[in-house]
Amino acid sequence: MACGFTPLQVLWCIVGPQMLRHTLPGLSNNWLVMIKATAIVSVIGLSDLMNRAAQAAGTTREPFLFYGAAALLYLAFTTLSELGFAWLARRLAIGTR
């Protein structure tokens, strides 16, 4: 308030980044649980992906190939999410160390 900020500017520029720095580990954990337990961004669900892999494995008699592809897809989503959250945590930790 001493710098002439409105209450919304104080929240957006000062208080918000400080709060986000402390809530980021919980947010990233909830995001990863959501990816693994529910639909990924409302496009592909785990059960749908695994059913498709089971159908393809039953048709071609190569289950390892299709289940491995499904596992790699989820590994890619979680790895990219973790890298994004790590970048955001480094960005928010500037000036705190």
Image (cartoon, rainbow, N blue to C red):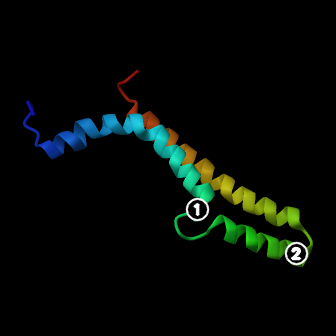
Instruction: Give percent across and percent down for residue 6.
Output: 10, 43
Q: On the rendered structure, is 53 left or right of 30?
A: right
Instruction: Give percent across and percent down for residue 78.
Output: 61, 51
Location of the N terminus (image quadrant): top left
Report helix, strand or loop for mark 2. Answer: helix
Nearer the camera: disc 1 or disc 2: 1
For the point 90% across and 68% down, the residue is 62
Location of the C terminus (image quadrant): top left
Residue 58: image tag:
2
For the point 41% across and 38% down, the residue is 23
- Residue 47 in sight: yes
Q: Is residue 88 above or below residue 76?
A: above
Q: Is residue 76 above or below residue 22?
A: below
Amino acid residing under circle 2: Gly
Report helix, strand or loop for mark 1. Answer: loop
According to the picture, the residue beneath numbered tag 1 turns out to be: 38
For the point 51% across and 48% down, the residue is 30
Cα distance in 3D space between marks 1 and 2? 25 Å
Instruction: Give percent across and percent down for residue 7.
Output: 13, 42
Report the front residue among 64 and 91: 64
**Residue at the bottom extreme?**
59
